[in-house]
Amino acid sequence: MAVPDVAVVGFAEAPNLRAADATTNGVEMLVPLFEQVLDELSMTRHDIGFWCSGSSDYLAGRAFSFIAAIDAIGAVPPINESHVEMDAAWALYEAWVKLRTGEVDTALVYGFGKSSAGDLRRTLALQLDPYSVAPLWPDSVTIAALQARLGLETGMWTEREMAEVSARSLRDGATNPLAQRGHATDADALLAEPTLADPLRAYDCAPITDGASVVVLAAADRARELRRDPAWITGMAHRTESGTLTARDLTRSSSTQDCSKAAGTDGVAVAELHAPFSHQDIVLRRALGLGDAVSVSPSGGALCGNPMFSAGLSRIGHAARHVLDGRAEKVLGHATSGPALQQNLVCVMEGGN
């Protein structure tokens, strides 16, 4: 049996907000997104063959919190559903595999996170080695600052290069109406800002963000029925590295490099990178081998809004839009999870039939 091709056919994203007027189960953010993306495709909830989500019980502060989010879909009729305790980019991977088996021909993937409900920097410390590191409670910004300092001390990047990444993101964020922050600026202005966690300044760090996003996938002829120009997924891979910070080179991302080779990223025109810190943008660009001609995170990226557990899915959605709108032929979306780029996923999409 031939394995069906799979494409992104729809994408919707909620406004990236410092604190959304919503509960931690995400229902208030998800309901309008479902309506928006299904209306655009002239579909109903009953047309979806598989639902898959990404979220975190740690962030919500209670067990099985994702079950409450299913209220956004409705209790009747029963649905074919799954969940990952990760960014929803990994839920998209699961849905992609499901579609490739031929069991269903449509899937809706969603992710959500209300980071403002707790102490995010402390919550993320729970991802660390539970025996020797987590008991010290190093927060997520401190871990990233150690990574940034290592790169500076070894000559892998400079503070100016980091500031240039932040300035580019803020300028691009100003053109994205859903971004949390964005304005005209330059590296000199950002370098004059005080440090937040040496050597990181506030604009080197993604803001705490509440948000959600949705991607619709379809297989083969169903994709062509829904979109004249679907964004075909021509390569997707994810890899993980050691959870022990001293067991890997933090100035490089070998897992992203392996994903790049497996997914086939040569020739992409647009790359949406999930880089929550400015120096991580540099690490990822080098791992992916992106040249100066590639447009990097034109949405503004995670530095302009980083809703936990949907920001990676949003990078895939933003990249896909360039194909769906006919602005690019080949693009990639990247997602990360874990401390200091521990886990990475790359999704390559192309136009044409």
Image: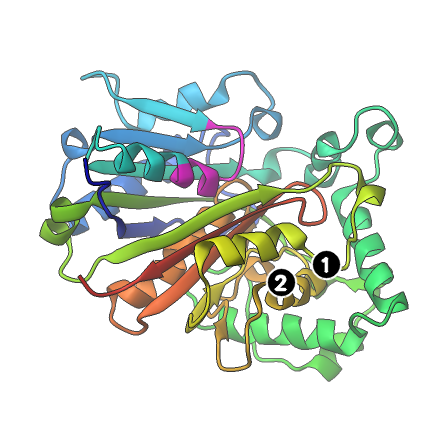
Residue 224 or residue 137, whichever sits in front: 224
Identify the amino acid type marked 1: Arg
Residue 21 seen in the current view: no
Determine the residue positioned at 43% across, 70% down: 270
Q: Position of residue 52 (x, y in %)?
A: 36, 31
Q: Which residue is mark 1?
A: 252
Residue found 22% across the figure and 57% down from its top: 230
Disc 2 marks a residue whose amino acid type is Ala
User: Taken as a whole, is the magenta stretch helix, strand or loop?
Assistant: helix
Residue 27: percent from left, percent from top: 38, 31
Q: Taking 36 as reference, is 175 above or below it?
A: below
Label 1: how many Cα within 10 Å (few below 14, some 14–19, many 20+): some
Q: Under tag 2, what secondary structure? A: helix
Q: Would you call the spot at circle 2 few (<14 residues within 10 Å), some (14-19), or many (20 or more)?
A: some
Q: In the rendered view, does 203 fall on the left or right side of 250?
A: left
Q: Is residue 3 visible?
A: yes
Extent of the magenta region: 84-93
The percent coordinates of residue 167 (x first, y second) are 63, 75
Name the residue carrying label 2.
Answer: 287
Asked whether the beta carbons under mark 2 and mark 1 sit within 8 Å of each other, the answer is: yes
